[in-house]
Amino acid sequence: MRPVLPGDISAAARALLPVPSGARARLANLLVKEAAAADCYRKRFRKAHAQWGNGTLMSAAMMRPLAREPRLDDRDYLECQFLVFEALFKRGQSPVS
């Protein structure tokens, strides 16, 4: 997966918001896997993957409906951001480039 930037975290969290809370962790893990697979595809074929994007977490997230960006004191949004960070740590990705 390409380096993770603040916009990637925001986009991924916004992709999680419309999903029921019980399914959010699974989707966060899936987004990270899709971004990693898309990056491998991009390196091999020198183009973005049609379904998962260009290897960034943001492009994988943007393939799904995104909620409007809420305020940073929105508890659901904070939970979604936490789940994205957790998925990155599980995968061994540093959320800071």
Image (tube, rainbow, N blue to C red):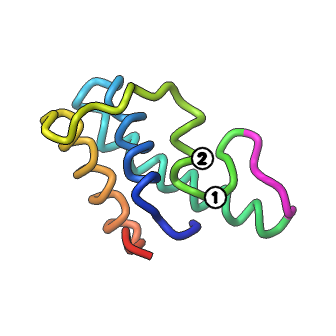
- Which residue is outermost to the right? 45
Q: Position of residue 81 (x, y in %)?
A: 27, 48
Please state if 65 lies on the left or on the right of 95 as rendered.
right
83 within the magenta span:
no
| Residue range of the region highlighted in magenta in the rendering | 45-50
- Circle 2: element type: helix
Kindly identify the residue that appears in the image at 67 percent across and 47 percent down: 53
Of 7 and 36, nearer the camera is 7
- Which residue is outermost to the front? 71
Residue 51, compared with residue 6, is above or below; it is above
Q: Position of residue 32 (x, y in %)?
A: 47, 55
Tell me the residue that label 1 is attached to: 55
From mark 2 to mark 1, how far is it between C-alphas? Answer: 7 Å
Please state if 85 lies on the left or on the right of 93 as rendered.
left
Amino acid beneath label 2? Ser
Amino acid beneath label 1? Gly
47 within the magenta span:
yes
Q: How many marks?
A: 2
The quarter of the image holding the C terminus is bottom left
Point out which mark residue 59 bears. 2
Residue 62, compared with residue 20, is above or below; it is below
Residue 27, compared with residue 37, is above or below; it is above
Magenta span main SS:
loop
Q: Circle 1: is it few (<14), some (14-19), or many (20+) Cα within 10 Å?
A: many
Kindly identify the residue that appears in the image at 57 percent across and 51 percent down: 34
Q: Position of residue 75 (x, y in %)?
A: 13, 36
Res 76 → quadrant: top left
Kindly identify the residue that appears in the image at 38 percent across and 26 percent down: 68
Of 78 and 31, nearer the camera is 78
- Does the residue at mark 2 contact the one at mark 1 (Cβ under 8 Å)? yes
Q: Circle 2: is it few (<14), some (14-19), or many (20+) Cα within 10 Å?
A: many
